[in-house]
């Protein structure tokens, strides 16, 4: 059924279809509409889930860890400071191999207080062992959430489904909502591979000495490696059921492109327009959307960029003292290749600033005109000092 | 596991328990259960265990609640009606919304005891050989007899009047304390084997008569003789003594209340007289030399008197009484406030500003003293021991003589009289066991909190002895665990009925209402098994066993959450002693 809904509601619809049994939440803009919708569903009996209002995000995730250990499917959603507050338990979730799924609405970190789109919150959690999927539109949000449960439960790692604040969370778009039956066929009930039980009591997550700890960590690394072929397989299955095809990365007109935009999330949609315009002008330009950030799809990226001369990475995030994070990751992915494109990093749209087609065209022109990239990345659209800065 | 997978889902899992990790060794602070003292029970002259009484009432365990009162106060039917309830004035709940209606609940428990014919358990103390004589069957004497009998003494009460009760029987009008309510409490003493000899006036010689069979005498004759104003024209023909007026009324003697009656004084007797005059069909005007807020009468009684039609004239002092035909002319000096004395406004004559009133009757109620001079306790000397509520005279080879009740109390109230009787009884028990020298220190060991009230339960090494003397403050109550609830509204007779009858004003309340009121009680410092400590403990280290709890110190990390989440400060957190 096709309905015009918010990105936030698309998450909630997927959570409903996934028959999640325990939901915990602490409100934070712009995540709020997600959990508000779910709490309505629980209240109205549309969802048969236990909805727990917690006193903070750390408790939210702690509660889900407990619930998931009991062998039920769980969900939470957060943003920005809330995610930062969960940090310790993000590590915990992956370490305990719990397939928890979270919606993370990208929002800038404070201070200064800012509730608008910025990816630094989720990207700065890249080393916690969570799989991260970045979404472009409402449909992708819904579909990725369903895929996330399949993937998480296949490899026993937690998954973060990431969506931009307001540009996606609060934007109404037509979204195809799968029927209960179809969703059930794609995502059957959770079958935990281990669980706490009073019948067979065991202690979980205890002390692991050096003689064993490395193997445990290596197994998480292997599970992360497994996640890449797994998600491709699951996405194939999804495509055959629903007719919508997703891939860890999406390459548009890259084969003959000299300059390739590398984007993620909603900036991708704008770039698609710019791409058409530039192509019409005869420019040899391509677009590469990164959907799966963890595990980082290195081989797929290498393949997609093998013909490119220059790559313009748009980062709505920044790692202080280094550069934009997607640019960093891409450099690392390509650096051992004998022949590789130049990587141009652009910092744009920080704290929700609009990334318009003009901004992207400006980036294209700069990339074309610049012989040697700036390793720190170039901040686009900064006001001159003294203009209210 | 999917065979295509490289990972093998390694998770840290143990078949052993984590019990071996005794996290209690991390502890720097040590929580423990420690019942403390509620401010109400320390303020109660009789030291009643109010938090426990209200807890039991809230649980519907009315018999245990009633027996808990009886451990410290033999007169719940009386005190539920006429005690001026200092407990409510200091109630911590008063800082939150409104104080608990402790007296209303006490009255309810007394009514319930009467309805179901509750009887207190028999005393467990071994019998004494000594026999005690008590002169005066008022509240102090009756209380002394009760507590003595609880401790195994035989005692005889000698009462000059035809019935026991003293001021309760003869000095308080029936609309506040009906005869049968008093009788309910007095009969319990007789059931317990205490002999009350009525119409037996004792003289001074009895106190020292070597021929009588008693090993100690308690003098508790009360203040039954009204004081004179000391103005010209004041004599028995013009002025009626308030206590006499009330006694005649209670005795059923015809008393006149026609026309206007001037009542001189500002205490409870003055108010009782004025309200009785209204009920007899007359008009009552109280003349008081200070301001209304300075009246020693209970504010609630004064308020009800005004509702019933009593006029209160403040800042007027009588100066002379003259006959004017069949009426009386009362001259009055107007007063003004000027500075302070003894904590209240000092009043002085307002120059030659005077007035006069023509009235039918003048009733005087400005205070009372002992009926006979020998009833007065002797001055302090080497042979006397002055305690908070009593004075004892020892003589070499003589039996101890104890003065109790109004004769020895600074505050003349029913509950202070009961406290005094209790103190005298405890003093005698100590005297006969350990001698006179032990009395003061033993009594100090059984006070409630830091108050002056003594507890029989503490004296007899009951559970209350374990409670800390710390009086729980409002700031120590975790009000997050309470919600606002209005205090019970005492049902009363309609005002029209009150003006014309001596029927009891305050009506009974139902068990449902009583429980609703009792559940409002914070139970300050007293564990009521709410289980918050156990539910909030993040380390599952509060263990419930049957109806009690203990901290499992093997695993308690000393976070103190249990102490903070205890709504009523029945837990304490101390520094851990380092080995």
Image (cartoon, rainbow, N blue to C red):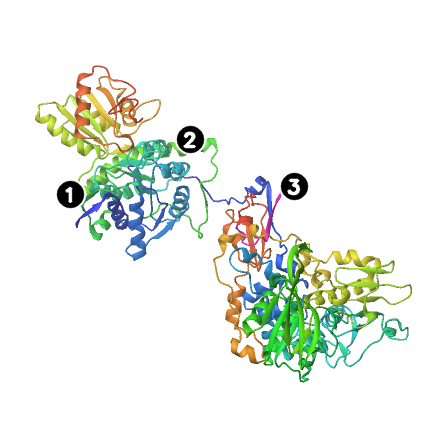
Where is residue B373 shown, x and y percent of the image? 83, 70
- How many angstroms separate mark 1 from mark 2 (CA)? 42 Å
- B292, B492: nearer the viewer: B292
Q: Does mark 2 fall on the same chain as mark 1?
A: yes
Residue B567 is left or right of residue B140, and the answer is left
Q: Which residue shows up at 74% across the image and 82% down it? A: B162
Query: Quadrant of residue A204 in the image?
Result: top left
Mark 1 touching mark 2, by CB under 8 A? no
Residue A237 is left or right of residue A203, and the answer is left
Report the residue marked by disc 2: A214
Start-end of magenta stretch: B565-579
Magenta stretch secondary structure, dominant? loop
Marker disc for residue A243: 1
Magenta stretch: includes residue B566: yes
What chain does badge 1 belong to? A
- B560, A157: nearer the viewer: B560
Can the viewer see residue B102? yes
Report the residue marked by disc 3: B577
């Amino acid at each position: 059924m096709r309905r015009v809904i918010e990105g936030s509601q698309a998450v909630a619809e997927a959570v409903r279809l996934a028959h999640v049994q325990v939901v915990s939440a602490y409100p934070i803009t712009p995540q709020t509409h997600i959990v508000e919708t779910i709490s309505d569903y629980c209240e109205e009996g549309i969802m048969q889930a236990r909805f727990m209002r917690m006193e903070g995000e750390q408790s939210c995730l702690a509660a889900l860890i407990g619930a998931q250990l009991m062998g039920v499917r769980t969900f939470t959603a957060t943003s920005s400071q809330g995610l930062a507050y969960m940090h310790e338990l993000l590590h915990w979730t992956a370490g305990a191999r719990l397939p928890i799924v979270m919606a993370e609405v990208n929002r800038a970190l404070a201070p200064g207080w800012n509730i608008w789109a910025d990816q630094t919150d989720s990207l700065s959690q890249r080393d916690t062992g969570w799989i991260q999927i970045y979404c472009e539109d409402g449909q992708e949000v819904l579909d990725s959430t369903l895929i996330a449960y399949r993937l998480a439960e296949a490899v026993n790692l937690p998954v973060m489904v990431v969506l931009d604040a307001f540009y996606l969370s609060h934007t109404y778009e037509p979204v195809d909502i799968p029927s209960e039956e179809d969703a059930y066929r794609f995502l059957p009930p959770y079958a935990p591979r281990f669980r706490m039980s009073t019948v067979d009591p065991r202690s979980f997550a205890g002390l692991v000495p050096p003689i064993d700890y490395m193997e445990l960590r290596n197994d998480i690394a292997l599970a992360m490696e497994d996640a890449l072929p797994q998600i491709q397989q699951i996405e194939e299955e999804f495509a055959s059921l629903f007719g919508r095809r997703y891939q860890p990365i999406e390459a548009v007109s890259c084969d003959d492109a000299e300059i390739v935009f590398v984007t993620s999330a909603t900036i991708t949609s704008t770039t698609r327009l710019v791409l058409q315009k530039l192509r019409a002008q005869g420019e040899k330009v391509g677009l590469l959307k990164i959907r799966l950030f963890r595990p980082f799809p290195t081989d797929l990226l290498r393949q997609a960029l093998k013909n490119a001369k220059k790559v313009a990475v748009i980062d709505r995030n920044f790692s202080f003292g280094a550069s934009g994070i997607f640019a960093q990751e891409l450099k690392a992915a390509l650096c051992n290749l004998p022949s590789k494109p130049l990587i141009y990093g652009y910092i744009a749209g920080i704290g929700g600033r609009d990334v318009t087609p003009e901004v992207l065209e400006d980036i294209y022109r700069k990339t074309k005109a610049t012989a040697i990239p700036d390793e720190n990345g170039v901040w686009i659209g900064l006001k001159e000092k003294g203009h209210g800065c | 596991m999917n065979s295509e997978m490289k990972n093998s889902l390694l998770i840290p899992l143990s078949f052993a328990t984590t019990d071996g990790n005794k996290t209690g060794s991390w502890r720097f602070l040590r929580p423990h259960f420690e019942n403390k003292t509620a401010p109400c029970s320390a303020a109660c002259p009789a030291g009643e265990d109010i938090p426990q009484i209200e807890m039991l009432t809230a649980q519907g365990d009315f018999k245990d609640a009633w027996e808990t009162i009886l451990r410290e106060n033999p007169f719940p039917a009386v005190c539920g009606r006429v005690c001026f309830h200092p407990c409510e004035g200091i109630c911590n709940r008063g800082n939150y919304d409104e104080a608990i209606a402790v007296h209303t609940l006490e009255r309810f428990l007394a009514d319930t005891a009467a309805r179901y014919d509750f009887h207190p358990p028999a005393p467990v103390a071994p019998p004494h050989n000594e026999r005690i004589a008590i002169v005066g069957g008022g509240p102090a004497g009756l209380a002394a007899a009760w507590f003595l009998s609880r401790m195994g003494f035989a005692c005889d009460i000698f009462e000059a009047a035809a019935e026991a009760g003293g001021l309760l029987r003869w000095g308080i009008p029936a609309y506040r304390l009906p005869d049968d309510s008093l009788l309910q409490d007095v009969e319990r003493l007789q059931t317990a084997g205490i002999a009350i000899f009525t119409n037996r006036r004792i003289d001074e010689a009895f106190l020292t008569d070597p021929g009588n069979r008693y090993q100690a005498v308690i003098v508790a004759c009360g203040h039954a003789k009204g004081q004179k104003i000391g103005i010209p024209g004041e004599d028995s023909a013009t002025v009626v003594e308030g206590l006499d007026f009330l006694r005649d009324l209670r005795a059923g003697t015809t008393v006149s209340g026609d026309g206007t009656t001037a009542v001189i004084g500002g205490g409870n007797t003055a108010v009782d007289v004025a309200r009785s005059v209204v009920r007899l069909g007359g008009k009552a005007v109280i003349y008081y030399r200070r301001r209304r807020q300075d009246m020693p009468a209970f504010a609630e009684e004064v308020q009800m008197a005004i509702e019933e039609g009593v006029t209160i004239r403040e800042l007027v002092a009588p100066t002379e009484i003259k006959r004017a035909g069949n009426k009386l002319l009362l001259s009055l000096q107007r007063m003004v406030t000027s500075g302070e004395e003894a904590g209240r406004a000092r009043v002085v004559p307002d120059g030659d500003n005077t007035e006069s009133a023509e009235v039918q009757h003048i009733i005087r109620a400005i205070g009372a003293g002992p009926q006979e001079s020998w009833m007065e306790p002797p001055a302090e000397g080497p042979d006397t021991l002055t305690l908070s509520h009593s004075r004892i005279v020892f003589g070499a080879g003589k039996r101890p003589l104890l003065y109790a009740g109004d004769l020895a109390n600074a505050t003349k109230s029913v509950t202070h009289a009961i406290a005094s009787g209790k103190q005298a009884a405890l003093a005698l028990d100590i005297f006969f066991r350990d001698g006179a020298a032990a009395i003061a220190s033993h009594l100090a060991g059984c006070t409630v909190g830091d108050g002056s009230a003594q507890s029989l339960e503490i004296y007899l090494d009951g559970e209350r002895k374990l409670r800390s003397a710390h009086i729980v403050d409002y700031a120590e109550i975790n009000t997050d665990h309470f919600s606002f609830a209005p205090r019970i509204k005492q049902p009363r007779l309609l005002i029209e009925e009150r003006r014309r009858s001596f029927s009891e004003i305050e009506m009974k309340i139902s068990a449902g209402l009583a429980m609703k009121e009792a559940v409002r009680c914070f139970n300050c410092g007293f564990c009521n098994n709410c289980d918050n400590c156990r539910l909030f403990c993040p380390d599952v280290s509060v263990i419930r066993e049957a109806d009690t709890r203990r901290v499992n110190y093997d695993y308690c990390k000393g976070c103190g959450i249990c102490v903070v989440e205890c709504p009523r400060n029945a837990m304490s957190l101390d520094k851990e002693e380092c080995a």
